[in-house]
Image (tube, grey):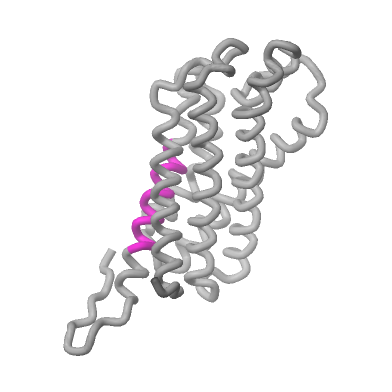
């Protein structure tokens, strides 16, 4: 198989769609997180899928940025870099939840409870050191990066505009949901997840429409 820019762009679109689907899927019927559930196979599997989601999302937004570098401009570059930091942080903290916390739950229950509180939007009672700072950076990068990158993609007028707008405002929606009761907490993933699905599919279609057509075949143009 020949690797071309079109192939890579379509792969990035597929990665973004997969990331959005996983991000939403792992939240459905998610068990309550506590010292007992963090060690279960189900929660470890869900957190492992979240690590995969962050990696796929990073590949997806990279394809979105590189496929339209000039149109994205400086704002797009800043937004892409900040959002990348957000997804890299999500990958790191989720890996801790998936593989570190279950291993120390029996020997250091207090520390694990504090980390779970941090991860679920509650106040930790103990000192979490650098992890507290990483979590704060993650939250800022995820929200600010999504806003800036979404605005840049919206201005570029290449990908589906409803999805670019949802990516931009998704952070604001997430903040609103974060201060609501726990029953709404799992909905935090939905705005960004839906945006990633829409952006990924739009990127895939855009790459497909730009593929050179065989001689004698009409050239199709993506109308989305």
Q: Nearer the viewer, residue 79 or 95?
A: 95
Would you place residue 224 above or below residue 175 in this image?
below
Is 73 displayed left or right of 68 in the figure? right
Quarter of the image for the N terminus: give it. Answer: bottom left
User: Does residue 205 show up magenta in the picture?
Assistant: no
- The part of the image, by quadrant, that contains residue 213 is bottom left
Quarter of the image for the C terminus: give it. Answer: bottom left
Q: Nearer the viewer, residue 158 or 94?
A: 94
Q: Residue 55: give x, y in percent of width and height.
A: 55, 48
Kindly give the residue lying farthest to the bottom in the view shown.
215
The residue drawn where x is 28% and y is 70% is: 222
User: Does residue 192 show up magenta in the picture?
Assistant: yes
Q: Most prominent secondary structure in the magenta stretch? A: helix
Q: Residue 17: give x, y in percent of width and height.
A: 39, 50
Kindly give the residue lying farthest to the front in the view shown.
1
Q: Residue 77: give x, y in percent of width and height.
A: 61, 65
Is 35 displayed left or right of 109 in the figure? left
The residue drawn where x is 56% and y is 24% is: 179
Would you place residue 148 above or below residue 95 in this image?
below
Q: Nearer the viewer, residue 23 or 186?
A: 23
Q: Residue 198: give x, y in percent of width and height.
A: 36, 52
Would you place residue 68 above or below residue 213 in this image?
above
**Range drawn in magenta:** 190-204
The residue drawn where x is 18% and y is 84% is: 217
The residue drawn where x is 49% and y is 36% is: 49
């Amino acid at each position: 198989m020949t690797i071309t820019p079109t192939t890579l762009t379509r792969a990035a679109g597929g990665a973004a769609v997969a990331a959005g689907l996983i991000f939403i899927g792992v939240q459905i019927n998610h068990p309550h997180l506590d010292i007992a559930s963090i060690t279960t196979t189900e929660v470890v599997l869900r957190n492992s899928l979240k690590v995969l989601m962050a990696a796929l999302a990073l590949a997806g937004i990279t394809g979105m940025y590189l496929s339209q570098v000039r149109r994205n401009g400086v704002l797009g570059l800043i937004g892409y870099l900040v959002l990348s930091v957000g997804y890299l942080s999500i990958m790191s903290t989720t890996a801790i939840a998936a593989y570190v916390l279950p291993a120390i739950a029996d020997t250091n229950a207090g520390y694990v409870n504090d980390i779970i509180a941090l991860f679920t939007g509650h106040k930790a009672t103990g000192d979490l050191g650098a992890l507290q700072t990483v979590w704060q950076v993650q939250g800022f990068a995820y929200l600010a990066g999504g806003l800036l990158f979404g605005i840049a993609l919206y201005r570029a007028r290449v990908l589906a505009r409803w999805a670019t707008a949802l990516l931009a405002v998704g952070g604001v929606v997430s903040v609103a949901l974060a201060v609501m009761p726990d029953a709404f907490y799992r909905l935090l993933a939905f705005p960004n997840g839906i945006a990633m699905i829409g952006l990924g599919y739009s990127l895939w279609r855009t790459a497909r429409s730009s593929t050179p057509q065989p001689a004698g075949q009409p050239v199709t143009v993506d109308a989305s």
